């Protein structure tokens, strides 16, 4: 008999999606109620996932679904950041008039897709999780449907994402055809692993996944989609799908194809170098903060992939640490963006930050911390994230990757420091409003606190991560 | 056996010809009809190899739902009259050589991949295939769908739910001043609300206040 208790989180989430949908349909004007209930559901979900933490690796559903330390950890950071995303963006959604019952429900179903993707140990399960996740994201991107930019971003994301899904499916079918199974473990043990067909399939799958985390050269959609979608959705885009796709990367490369490391290592190194360089250079000319963060996230994904490319446990762990700290930085940066509000209009241009430090000293300090951390300046958390990656990479004597990574950090530091200069040394503009919701304030305080205080006790995160042993 | 072969060739000939006609037909409505013909002949082929469930599902789902939906869309959009001039126009013809080049490269690469294809040796030996005489097609399909892959079945359900929610969110608009039927109001209406017995005096008539 199957161990149903291992998939209780997924079952709970599906049931609560349907329950909330019912509440929304049968109770009039229940948008706020559904929104709050879904936060409660996420908190319960988090405790359910935490419950599975100490369990050794287990496979359910004909070995197609894997519960392990990796999946539990990734699921829990996904859910925590989802909770904070919901906390911080409630005010924004309300003032943009897009608070409908479907909004939290779509977010929940996207999280369900991510959880399935994170736990997948089979090509079909993986693909279905990916589709569930991105289908909800297409709708969320164009949620502000009366806005031209938002509709455009939804359509753009949908078309390009459908194309990449097609490539990914083609890769899956090649792998299935040549290895004879869709299950990762069977694929790993199949004797035909070195044939062209399997390698072709692997390349197609890497392309599809690289699209999902917007790594160069499959990044074209990211800046437009980030700019066009409502900021709350951009926050969601910038943070959560990357965790799921990175886990899928780890699952893919290190379960079925770990013996093909010579084949995929070069591809991964190329993608990583290209993303780091492009993310650093293309962001310089941007004037919109959301576009800027899009390019910055492209660069950050390059660093995360560099850890994966090293092919060691240390590398994987450093990537996981990197993505966790990246989540905190994204949350912090976007909470600052949500605070730039004047008479229900949200400002997202770089020049709107001009002289912010005079009128809003605390907000400016938060921005200062998060920007320094994004640039990787010690002793903030962002420095340690990059430090672990470079350590893992250098240990494998991949010096070129490390050198390019360091150089692009320096280039990227330019535009982060430019923002700080604008905040602290330019002429002040009008004051922004200061009456923010409690959730937003809490999110900003906690995330800034983590970024500053991480160096005092890094073991808090590292202890969890070091339990994740893949190979 | 000969009759089997004859029918096989008839149906597959129809299938191939109508598949070509789907793309070749000038009129879009004709294309859809050829598509329907194609589906029907393929479902006949399915029934001939003993996969009666797949054949019937093919008829019900593809002919009954999908093709009819196509037909509706084609009629609604009125694309039947439009001629496809994309290939001929000057604007697009500059892209065609590059597109052809890239597709040629990908095609050659795929040839290399498929060149390595070989069937498993035990697949060619038909005595290895286990066919149970007691379980029907439908039964074994159901076993796969609802027992082995139940989780995938449920996840697909969630995907369809999300698709439905998304379609509603993006298109539904509540219009103001719309008159709606209220069943409860209609049913709970009683005689005294609508009918009034008036004493009509002789040669006077009734004044009805509206």
Image: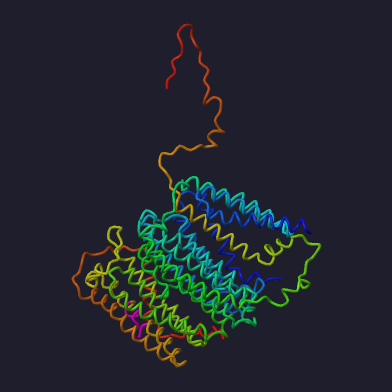
Tell me: A60 left or right of A129: right
Toward the right, the furthest residue is B134
In this rendering, the answer to whether A376 lies above or below A289 is below
From this view, report whether residue B110 is shown above or below residue A470.
above
Q: Position of residue B61 (x, y in %)?
A: 62, 53
Residue B82: image location, x then y, percent: 44, 49
Image quarter hosting the N terminus of chain A: bottom right
**Which of B29/B164 is in front?**
B29
Image quadrant for the C terminus of chain A? bottom right
* Of the pair A171 and A416, the residue shown nearer to us: A171
Residue A377 falls inside the magenta stretch:
yes
Query: Along the line of sight, which residue is nearer the eye, B121 or A9?
Result: B121
The residue under the point 41% across, 75% down is A217
Looking at the rendered structure, the number of numbered marks drawn on it comes to: 0
Which residue does the image show at 53% across and 85% down from the upper left?
Answer: A261
Magenta-tinted stretch: A371-380
Left/right placement of residue A200 relative to residue A286 reads right
**What colouring does the structure picture have?**
rainbow
In this picture, is B195 found above or below A155?
above
Q: Is residue B75 magenta?
A: no
Quadrant in the picture for residue A280: bottom left
Residue at screen point 53% across, 35% down:
B185
Q: Residue furthest top?
A: B203
- Name the image quarter holding residue B43: bottom right
Above or below: residue A62 compared with residue B163: below
Which x, y percent locates residue B56?
A: 68, 53
Front residue of A217/B154: it is: A217
Identify which residue is drawn at 48% across, 47% down: B80
């Amino acid at each position: 008999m199957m161990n149903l208790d291992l998939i209780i989180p997924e079952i709970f989430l599906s049931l609560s999606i349907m329950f909330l949908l019912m509440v929304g349909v049968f109770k009039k004007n229940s948008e706020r109620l559904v929104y709050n209930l879904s936060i409660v559901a996420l908190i319960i979900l988090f405790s359910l996932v935490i419950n599975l933490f100490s369990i050794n690796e287990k496979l359910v559903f004909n070995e197609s679904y894997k519960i392990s330390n990796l999946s539990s950890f990734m699921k829990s950071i996904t859910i925590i950041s989802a909770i904070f995303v919901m906390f911080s963006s409630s005010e924004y959604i309300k003032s943009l008039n897009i608070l409908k019952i479907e909004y939290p429900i779509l977010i929940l179903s996207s999280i369900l897709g991510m959880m399935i993707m994170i736990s997948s140990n089979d090509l079909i399960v993986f693909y279905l999780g990916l589709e569930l996740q991105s289908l909800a994201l297409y709708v969320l991107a164009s949620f502000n449907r009366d806005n031209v930019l938002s509709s455009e971003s939804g359509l753009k994301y949908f078309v390009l994402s459908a194309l990449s899904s097609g490539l990914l499916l083609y890769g899956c079918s090649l792998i299935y055809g040549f290895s004879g199974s869709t299950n990762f473990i069977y694929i790993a043990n199949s004797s035909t692993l070195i044939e062209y067909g399997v390698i072709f399939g692997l390349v197609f799958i890497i392309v599809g996944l690289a699209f999902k985390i917007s790594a160069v050269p499959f990044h074209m959609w990211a800046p437009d989609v980030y700019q066009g979608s409502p900021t709350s959705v951009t926050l969601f885009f910038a943070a959560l799908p990357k965790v799921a796709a990175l886990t899928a990367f780890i699952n893919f490369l290190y379960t079925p194809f770990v013996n093909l490391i010579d084949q995929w290592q070069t591809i991964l190194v190329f993608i990583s170098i290209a993303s780091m360089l492009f993310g650093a250079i293309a962001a310089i000319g941007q004037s919109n903060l959301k576009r800027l963060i899009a390019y910055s996230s492209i660069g950050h994904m390059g660093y995360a992939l560099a850890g994966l490319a090293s092919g060691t446990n240390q590398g994987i762990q450093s990537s996981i640490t990197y993505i966790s700290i990246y989540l905190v930085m994204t949350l912090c940066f976007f909470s600052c963006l949500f605070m730039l509000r004047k008479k229900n209009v949200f400002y997202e241009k770089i020049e709107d930050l001009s002289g912010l430090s005079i009128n809003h000293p605390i907000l400016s300090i938060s921005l200062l911390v998060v920007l320094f951390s994004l640039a990787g300046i010690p002793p903030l958390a962002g420095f340690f994230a990059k430090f672990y990656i470079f350590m893992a990479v250098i240990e494998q004597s991949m010096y070129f990757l490390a050198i390019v990574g360091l150089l692009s950090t320096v280039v990227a530091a330019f535009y982060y420091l430019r923002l700080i200069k604008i905040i602290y040394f330019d002429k002040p503009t009008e004051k922004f409003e200061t009456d923010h919701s409690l959730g937003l304030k809490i999110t900003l305080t906690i995330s800034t606190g983590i970024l500053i205080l991480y160096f005092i006790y890094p073991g808090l995160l590292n202890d969890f991560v070091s339990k994740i042993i893949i190979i | 056996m000969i009759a089997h072969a004859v029918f096989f060739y008839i149906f597959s000939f129809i299938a191939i010809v109508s598949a070509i006609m789907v793309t070749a037909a000038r009129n879009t409505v004709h294309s859809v009809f050829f598509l329907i013909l194609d589906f029907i002949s393929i479902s006949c082929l399915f029934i001939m190899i003993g996969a009666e469930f797949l054949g019937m599902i093919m008829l019900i789902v593809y002919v009954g739902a999908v093709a009819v939906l196509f037909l509706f869309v084609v009629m609604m959009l009125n694309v039947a009259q439009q001629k496809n001039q994309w290939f001929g126009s000057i604007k697009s013809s500059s892209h065609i050589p590059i597109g052809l080049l890239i597709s040629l490269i990908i095609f050659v690469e795929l040839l290399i991949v498929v060149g390595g294809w070989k069937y498993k040796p035990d697949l060619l030996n038909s005595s290895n295939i286990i066919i149970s005489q007691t379980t029907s097609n439908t039964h074994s399909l159901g076993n796969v769908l609802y027992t082995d892959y139940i989780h995938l079945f449920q996840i697909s359900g969630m995907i369809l739910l999300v698709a439905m929610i998304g379609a509603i969110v993006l298109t539904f608009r509540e219009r103001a001043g719309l008159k709606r039927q209220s069943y409860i109001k209609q049913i709970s209406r009683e005689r005294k609300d609508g009918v009034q017995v008036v004493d009509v005096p002789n040669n006077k008539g009734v004044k009805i206040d509206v």
